Amino acid sequence: MPINPIPVQEKQKEKNSVVFLVSEPSYQFSDMVIEPQLKGFIMDAISIFQYKEKVFEEWKLGKVIKKPMNFCINFYGEPGTGKTMAANAVASELGMKVLKVNYADIESKYVGETSKNLVSLFQYAKQENVLILFDEADALLSRRVTDMSSAADVSVNQTRSVLLTLLDSFEGMVIFTTNFIQNYDSAFMRRIPYHIRFDLPNEAVRYQLLNHYLMDTIPNRISIAEVAKKYNGISGSDIANATLAAALRTARAKKEYLEQVEFEQEIERILLSKRANKGDTEKEKEVITETREVTEAYAKEQLGKTGGIRL
């Protein structure tokens, strides 16, 4: 539940004040179905908070590698693979609250105000020791404009530069999540020491996810092993959404059991929408063209009718 609204922008409150919300972490690692290797990568990344002094002071690594003031992690990969859940689990692991930020939260129509919002955001996070979570971070970390032709272009580059400076001096934890790491500016890639990829679940993980959501308390006639094997390419979020939709449909129909055919119908519906979003449905792939032989007589006929050739 969100707590303690934070007024990040003090000036022009009546027009463009910005408020962020700090909340308790929504998830712990125990709430997630996560591959051991992926969890290991995440735990390695956040171990700097537990072992920074040991590694840099006792083991003298600080002689050859500068001890970082801050620490950033980037979670990237397909939508619905648990990036935001994992960020919350990291906050829970570190005993921190979460300050979640989308670019729209800090963007201002006033030139220069977006950068001020960022400065205020980092000042608050430092003061309160909260984890900053930039969700869908490619909007903020995208490549800087090289051919600046407007005040907006200058403002975008200014915002990127301010954020780079803030990351260099911030003594805390920042997590970025994105579905489009390819959009990141190379300067941000260098500032972030850990980039951790979240893949779509394999069959074994799909089996665990299905068991996680189709609990014993849900009466069903579903072969989890069969569904896990059949549906390659679905995410944990897809499975959760299909479970909810199928359960509601079953309850509304006053049926005794959640049947496999209805559960698979929900999965198919979700997959169809994802294919449509990518332009991959069979209907969209099918390009219908009409061809005809264009003779000289036909060309003259069309020119006479319309003053030009109709294609």
Image (cartoon, helix red, strand yellow):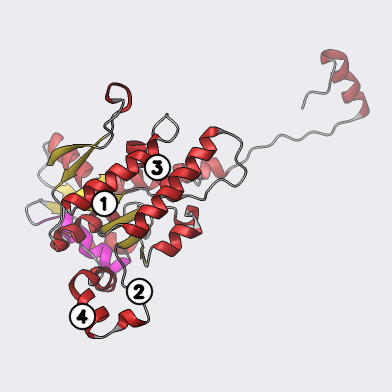
Which residue occupies the foreground of this view, 168 or 138? 168
Quarter of the rendering containing residue 270: top left
Q: CA distance from mark 2 to mark 1?
A: 23 Å
The prevailing secondary structure element of the residues shown in magenta is helix
Amino acid type indicated by mark 3: Ser
Q: CA distance from mark 4 to mark 2?
A: 14 Å
Q: Which mark is residue 132?
A: 1
Instruction: Say if mark 2 contacts mark 1, CB within 8 Å.
Output: no
The answer to whether residue 178 of the structure is visible from this angle is no
Q: Earlier in the sequence, mark 1 or mark 4?
A: 4
Q: Quadrant of the N terminus?
A: top left
Residue of label 3? 273
Q: CA distance from mark 2 to mark 3?
A: 48 Å
Label 3: element kind? helix
Is residue 231 located in the magenta-colored stretch of the structure? no
Farthest-out residue, left: 217
